[in-house]
Image (cartoon, rainbow, N blue to C red):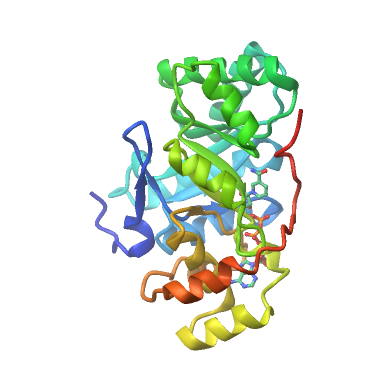
Amino acid sequence: MASVPVSGVSSATVLLNNGVSMPKVHLGVYQSTNRTKNAVKWALQAGYRAIDCAETYGNEKEVGAAIISYLKANPELSRDEIWFTTKLRVNTSYDVTRSSLKGSIKRTKLGYVDLYLLHTPSGGREKRLECWRALEDALIEGEVRSIGVSNYGIKHLQELLDSKPRVIPAVNQIEVHPFNTHSNLTAFCQKHGIVVQAYSPLVQGRRMDHPTIVELSKKHKVSQAQILLRWGIQKGFVVLPKSTNQERIIANADIWEFEIEETDMERLDGLDEGLVTEWDLLDTE
Ligand SMILES: NC(=O)c1ccc[n+]([C@@H]2O[C@H](COP(=O)([O-])OP(=O)(O)OC[C@H]3O[C@@H](n4cnc5c(N)ncnc54)[C@H](OP(=O)(O)O)[C@@H]3O)[C@@H](O)[C@H]2O)c1
């Protein structure tokens, strides 16, 4: 075990449907550009034990290098204590999926990927199912510890379940925050044992000054960002806040010492306006 101080963020995990424990807070690195290496280093120093990346973000190499350099500087930590997620660029074919994953592993030099996701439901039914078979084989062959999907709506999940897959997705990574709760989809995932990873959990900063968020942040003497993240944790989601600012990285992980009351959780749920910050692919054909 690591001898570095184990804070809430280091020890908060969720059990996936394949028996693997995954951290509840991941640093997101979308658009972290040339600040990626420092962001990952600061996150690991702050106790984060998971990074959410994707081939399309263009910074897998930097994330891998930052993790490896942190492990070298902290030999009491081992590779298997740090979670690395990445995602397939597009659903084209079985072979491209297998080679893309191998490319990600090679670029990061991490030896394996902890969670590999189909980034989108693009490509139509046949491609989705073909690429899923590639992920299943990669899992069986040990290149990944867990597999899942992202931006999948109920119809995509149902289609996959109906195809009698060898492996049920461990995760569906979707945009979720109080301003877009996707309550039907998250309930569907939870019913089927699929963990919801909430991306853009800070609404990309667009609703920080909403009166209810400000009021609750004053009530709990925490930041508005911490209210948004705590809401996600109390809903049973895994949250993926992105920041390249050291102070914000530290603060975003510090969400374990307060609890939002049930009535306030309901008020936050009531803020749902279907706000999409990034893209909405849940109805993709
Ligand atoms: N699967 C997908 O299709 C998909 C799509 C989108 C995102 N994601 C994943 O989810 C992660 C997070 O989503 P996101 O990057 O879209 O947005 P987000 O985490 O909701 O918001 C990030 C923005 O909030 C700012 N911020 C961070 N902490 C803050 C704080 N404490 N107070 C005020 N502002 C703060 C950041 O700026 P600073 O950096 O300057 O702090 C940045 O501008 C991504 O990095 C990616 O890993 C996945």
Report how many numbered discs are placed on residues in the image: 0
At horizontal 65% and vertical 39% (from top left) the residue drawn is: 151
Residue most extreme to the top: 95
Residue 174, percent from left and from top: 61, 46
157 is higher (above) or lower (below) than 188? above
Task: List x then y, in percent, for residue 107.
Answer: 59, 31
Residue 99 visible:
no
Quarter of image, res 202: bottom right
Q: In which quarter of the image is residue 159?
A: top right
Q: Quadrant of the image for the C terminus?
A: top right
Q: Can residue 3 be seen in this view?
A: yes
Front residue of this view, candidates 66 and 154: 154
Frontmost residue, 103 versus 188: 188
Q: Residue at x 43, y 54 (%)?
A: 236
Instruction: Give the image location of residue 48, x and y in percent.
Output: 43, 57
Residue at figure coordinates x 38%, y 38% from the top left:
16
Q: On the rendering, which quadrant does ligand 1 occupy? A: bottom right
Seen at 69% across and 42% down, the residue is 57
Across and down, in percent, residue 84 comes to 48, 41
Vertical comparison of 99 with 192: above or below: above
